[in-house]
Image (tube, grey):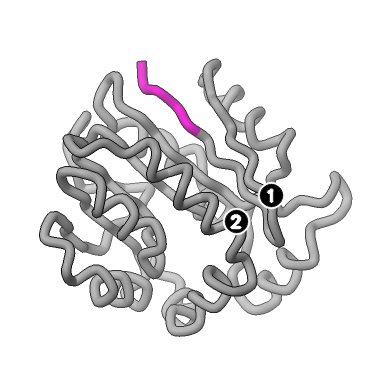
Amino acid sequence: MENVFWNRVALIYDGFVYIINRRVHKRLCEEVGKLISKDDDVLECACGTGMLTRVIGERCHHITATDLSRGMLNKTTYKCKDLRNAWFESADICELPYPDESFDKVVAANVIHLLDDPVKAIKELDRVCKKGGMLLIPTYLNKVDKEKDSLFSRMVDKAGADFKVQFDRFTYPLFFKELGYDDVDIIDIQGTVPCGLAVIIKN
């Protein structure tokens, strides 16, 4: 079900991306950009307002950018309207409408912590990724310690974002290990709200 919170914040979300957490998102774009090749067909889930969509679209063969929020998706579509190799559509990350092994790279940025069933989402991302392809899953590491969420998490949660899971740099790799992924590279990106970029090669 679409969360109206993300429709409401679509118009101001870029303030967080490009001002408050600029250092993290700049580095994230650089790291993801390095992993995209000109022959790649890419699926981006939870594209938000298109921060990574443009970076990916300028480097790949084709990108399908999706989001469950119409407000977010409309913003991305407008910002990336000049990308001739991009397709934009609404899709639920937990029930993706694509055949098995459809994409060379599958990207889902800063969404896993918002989901009721993150495990189901990971399984869907894996399903639509080709064998030998790559899953790129950046997620905010907003857990201060076992007893306390970060100030950012508490503020955004009160506003209506409704974080379901809180990760830190120790529990994020464990999340994937428990799902059976033994070889996961986590790129640690430090800043106001740090991020862990999980890079997984699908066997």
Q: Which residue is mark 1?
A: 190
Query: Split into 4 quadrants, where in the image is the N terminus?
Result: bottom left
Number of numbered discs overlaid on the protein picture? 2
Residue 200 magenta-highlighted: yes
Q: Which mark is residue 24?
A: 2
Residues marked 1 and 2 touching at CB (< 8 Å): yes
User: What's the residue type where badge 2 is placed?
Assistant: Val
Q: Quadrant of residue 69?
A: bottom left
Task: Considering the whole magenta stretch, tell me its main secondary structure.
Answer: strand
Q: Residues within 10 Å of mark 2 (few under 14, many from 20)?
A: many
- Taking the spot 44% from the left edge, 37% from the top edge, the residue there is 122
Q: Along the line of sight, which residue is nearer the eye, 135 or 96?
A: 135
Q: Along the line of sight, which residue is nearer the eye, 1 or 14?
A: 14
Residue 137 magenta-highlighted: no
What's drawn in magenta, residue-wise? 199-203
Could you tell me how far apart the alpha carbons at marks 1 and 2 are, in whole angstroms? Answer: 6 Å
Q: Secondary structure at mark 2?
A: helix
Query: Split into 4 quadrants, where in the image is the C terminus?
Result: top left
User: How far across and how far down the image is residue 119, in percent?
Assistant: 50, 38
In this rendering, is residue 11 above or below 89?
below
Q: Quadrant of residue 88?
A: bottom left
